[in-house]
Image (cartoon, helix red, strand yellow):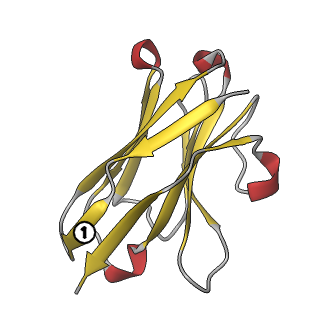
Amino acid sequence: QVQLVESGGGLVQAGDSLRLSCAASGGTFITYAMAWFRQAPGKEREFVAGIRSGGSTTYADSVKGRFSISRDHAKNTVYLQMNSLKPEDTANYYCAARRRGVTTFQNDYNYWGQGTQVTVSS
């Protein structure tokens, strides 16, 4: 079983930046596609960003140009740099992994972290 542990969430003001981290263990990190999803109260869980083992990235339209996903294979860690945060970004952010290929579908991912809360005030 692959274990994913998110960190870096917190309370910030609109326009601020935040960097989330997801540390992976129990698998071969470099072979996995990684993604970030988020879920706000009363809302469906939605895809935010994904990164393939080779480094190519995919972003949801709502965060394109503001968020950046990256990975450090040596540290078995994936990051989500969040800039120009908006109140609409408030959600619990989850790290997810699958064996091959980034998709935007929640059910395609086999492994999930526990989530880290991001709250953006007006």
Q: What element carries label 1?
A: strand
Residue closest to the far right = 107
Image x and y of residue 11, in percent: 25, 69
Looking at the image, which is closer to me, 83 or 111?
Answer: 111
Corner quadrant of residue 34: top right
Query: Disc 1 marks which residue?
Result: 11
Looking at the image, which is closer to me, 62 or 32?
Answer: 32
Kindly identify the residue that appears in the image at 24 percent across and 82 percent down: 121
Kindly identify the residue that appears in the image at 59 percent across and 20 percent down: 29
Is residue 67 shown above or below 3?
below
The quadrant of the image that shows the C terminus is bottom left
Image x and y of residue 99, in percent: 76, 28
Looking at the image, which is closer to me, 15 or 40?
Answer: 40
Kindly identify the residue that appears in the image at 64 percent across and 19 percent down: 26
103 sits to left or right of 88: right
Q: Which amino acid does label 1 sit on?
A: Leu
Number of marks drawn: 1
Corner quadrant of residue 107: bottom right
Image x and y of residue 91, in percent: 46, 71
Kindly identify the residue that appears in the image at 73 percent across and 27 percent down: 1
10 Å crowding of disc 1: few (<14), some (14-19), many (20+): few
89 sits to left or right of 83: right
Is residue 86 shown above or below 32?
below
15 sits to left or right of 70: left
Image x and y of residue 28, in percent: 64, 15
